[in-house]
Image (cartoon, rainbow, N blue to C red):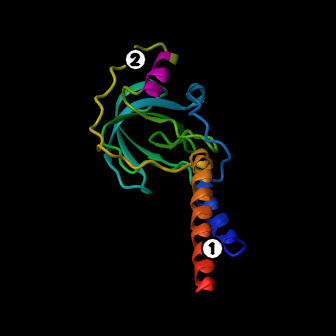
Amino acid sequence: MARCLPTVVLAVAALVAGDASACAISRPPAIREAREADAVFVGSVTNYRPGDPLAVEVKENISGEAQGKVTVLWRPGLNFGPPLEMKEEHLFAVDRIDGSASTYVVNQRNCEPALVFEKGSFHANAVREMFGLWPEPEAPKKSQPAAAPVPVGPIAGLLLLPLVLAAGAFFLRGKRRKRAYRTEL
């Protein structure tokens, strides 16, 4: 039993460990911060590669003076970076960079997602309503794969703990029986 204890402890630690993050708690987006943004607009991304500045064509200006093509940057070093892809139109709440008329940075606080939402989503409609506009119809959902992977978080790890311990005890009991059988022969 003493020999297997480190293995059991490591197995339980691996199951209980969640995703690594500098934030203790992920908070929902603070949509109320959109009121303080220099510009809020709906636009489509014309070229997108994660890590590069976004070229956005402004389709609807909700607040501020954004118009035409603008450049949107992500704040470096925050916990929530840009998404892997941005195909549809999005609502952006951004701050102006050094008085530039066409370069903005995404409004985002530490440990909170950026104020960039798909057009027609719950959060985008909440921002629209905050500015006295009608909500957009929700965009149709993309088809999901039948069996999406489910991450094992801390609660699931704790639920699996008795199962792991029972399997370890069963394994050890079987080894003791084999040793006892060998010594009798």
Amino acid found under the numbered disc labelled 1 = Arg
Foreground of the two, 6 or 83: 6
Element assignment for label 1: helix
Magenta includes 64?
no
Element assignment for label 2: loop
**Quarter where residue 128 is shown:** top left
Magenta includes 126?
yes
Foreground of the two, 71 or 171: 171
The image shows residue 96, relative to residue 121, as above or below, that is below
Q: Residue at x 62, y 41 (%)?
A: 109
The image shows residue 66, relative to residue 184, as above or below, that is above
Residue 82, percent from left and from top: 46, 49
Q: Which mark is residue 135?
A: 2
Q: Residue at x 66, y 48 (%)?
A: 23
**Quarter where residue 16 is shown:** bottom right
Residue 119, percent from left and from top: 37, 29
Q: Which mark is residue 151?
A: none
Residue 180, percent from left and from top: 63, 78
Q: Residue furthest right?
A: 2
Stretch in magenta: 122-129
Quarter of the image that includes the N terminus: bottom right
Quarter of the image that includes the C terminus: bottom right
Give the mark count: 2
Q: Residues within 10 Å of mark 2 (few under 14, many from 20)?
A: some
Amino acid found under the numbered disc labelled 2 = Pro
Residue 14, percent from left and from top: 59, 61
- Looking at the image, can residue 20 be seen? no
Q: Label 1, label 2: how many angstroms apart (C-alpha)?
A: 68 Å
> Which tag is nearer the camera, tag 1 or tag 2?
1
Q: Which residue is mark 1?
A: 176
